Image (cartoon, rainbow, N blue to C red):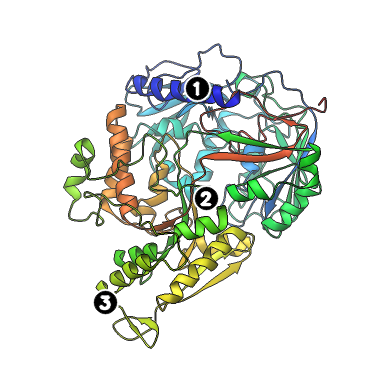
Amino acid sequence: MALDIFMGLRGFVATSSLILWGIDVHAEPAHAIAMYGVPALSADFTSLPYVNADAPKGGAITLGNTGGFDSLNPFVRKGTSPWQLPFFTHETLMGRSWDEPFTLYGLLAESVETDEERTWVEFKLREGTTFSDGSPLTVDDVIFSFELLGTEGHPRYISLYQQIESVEQTGPRSVRITFNAANRELALLAGMRPILSKAQWEGRDFADAPVQDIPVGSGPYTITGYETGRYVELTRNPDYWGADIPYRKGTNNFDSVKLDFYGDSKVLFEGFKVGEISAVREFNAESWQTQYDFPAITRGDIIKSEIPHSKPSGMTGFVMNTRRAPFDDWRVRDALIKAFNFEYINDTLTGNAQPRITSYFSNSVLGLIEGPAQGRVAELLLPYQDTLPNGTLEGYALPVSDGSARNRAGIRGAMEQFESAGYMVKDGALVRGDGTAVSFTILIAKGSTEDIAIAELYLRALERLGIAADIETVDDAQYFSRTGDFDFDITTFRRALSLSPGNEQKFYWGSDAADQLGSRNMMGARNHAIDAMIDEMLGARDSADFVAATRALDRVLTAGRYVIPFWSYTEGRIAHMREMKYPQTLPIYGDGAEWMPSVWWWDESN
């Protein structure tokens, strides 16, 4: 039943959103704001469509993370914090509906107002909003938070702050943000900035605060216990200010959520099998079929649930650091992709159960269309044809092997590319023109057992090319520190993408982010065509131009050969205790941090 409902909903949203895109938002207070068109839910909506508004409150669950943590502040670059924290403890002015490409509904703010060109946006706070310590959340806190995060917060907050002209109070509960750039998405991004307590942080060190200085939030949960690197205990706030607002109805139902940390995914899975963990997400299709046969499954104590979605594939794989030789040469990157025997690795590790990612936005309407660029996509790219990666206009597709372990065609093609780039094999080693041997390291976090297995198989192919590569495993703290500083040759990469890509694309692969420590541009991409296509996306006023610009961006990124792609995750897989329930109506985005556990509940009745 859930699948039928989902498929019908997906078709409706895909059609209606495209029809509605291009309709301007009028400058008057509204309950919601959409990137294009009008929000799907009217002002009198009582709950989000994918929640159970009558879900009971109660129960305690434990979720597992791999690695550790040394910070409980997820808003700064320093340290490693549990990735789930912001969803539990802090809130934004508006909240996202995961059943629409990009629409925000009132959360801390009861209304939003903007002009036709979205040069400014104004939010009016709800009456009675408070932080978890009982202190009121005011316009002063909003203004303070924008400045604090924009100057001392994580680099992901910098871009928006640089595009803000002013943040000023316009009424007892109203704040207006005026922008200095023509960018229609900024009004929505402003609604998604977390709000912190001015009383807690004014005059104090925010960026380097110790672990015990836990940021006070207004969210439904508070941190009530922790042991650094081992666990975090979150308890639902019985005095949570927003329990009855429409956006929150039927959500945050568990009384407590504990985050336990394990050395690696194998140990975590063993903990799940014996009941120490309440639910796990499984990303390997073969493991889903073959490893979930332990006694708790056969007794019915553990349920396997599959959650479909309509999200783009995003990109998962090994990213190459183009700031370093030899990865600054596209022919070398192409050779390393050719040497990666995906069909054999996929069969070995997943039983060929998962399709390969073919581009960054594959599996969606935003993905590139195979073959030469045509129509509006070609028009957008032609002015940059002298700097486009090879194959962008003509069409580029990933190599396909015969599935055998030898992958002779792939190895031969890789060697041809290396030779074209000036490399040769001497005494069994691949060497540069000056005679130095080619060697590099693949950096992987210790708990990433599947990535380690993929790398071990890949190294066999690299040995046949005469490349001395090795795997370096480090703990989570070192991994995030080194990748944030771009201190790697090749490393693991996962970039989830949405149906409404926007300003975050600059942070992911824009030229300005290439040397910005802590940015998500891990490959170090610097390409005027990438920057231009992102600008085209942000300036689009209708669906046709937006889709064309995204498909053009997809072409440049894919042909740039920055990442060796793995398999895509076409559905979510969650194994969970039978007492954990979720609604039958599923959002188009499927599973995610704001779906499980946010809309789930505890029921011991069956």
Asked whether 495 or 27 is in front, the reply is 495
- Where is 10 relative to 133, above or below? above
How far across and down, in percent of the image, does residue 166 sit? 41, 35
- Where is 406 relative to 542, above or below? below
Asked whether 550 or 183 is in front, the reply is 550
Which residue position is annotated with label 2? 154
Q: Quadrant of residue 197?
A: top right
How far across and down, in percent of the image, does residue 68 sit? 68, 57
Q: Residue at x 45, y 35 (%)?
A: 189
Q: CA distance from mark 2 to mark 3?
A: 41 Å
- Where is 93 relative to 208, above or below? above
Which residue position is annotated with label 1? 9
Q: Quadrant of residue 369?
A: top left
What quarter of the picture does the N terminus occupy? top right
- Where is 115 relative to 42, above or below? below
Q: CA distance from mark 2 to mark 1?
A: 36 Å
Is residue 322 among what the camera can see?
no
Q: Are marks 2 and 1 in contact (CB under 8 Å)?
A: no
Q: Are marks 3 and 1 in contact (CB under 8 Å)?
A: no
Which residue position is annotated with label 3? 422
Residue density around tag 3, few if under 14, some if 14–19, many if 20 or more, within 10 Å:
few
What quarter of the picture does the C terminus occupy? top right
The kind of residue tagged 2 is His
Q: Quadrant of residue 194?
A: top right
User: Element under label 1?
Assistant: helix
The kind of residue tagged 3 is Gly
Residue density around tag 1, few if under 14, some if 14–19, many if 20 or more, within 10 Å:
some
User: Element under label 3?
Assistant: loop
How far across and down, in percent of the image, does residue 95 sit? 55, 29
Point out the tag, 2 or 1, that comes first from the N-terminus: 1
User: Element under label 2?
Assistant: loop
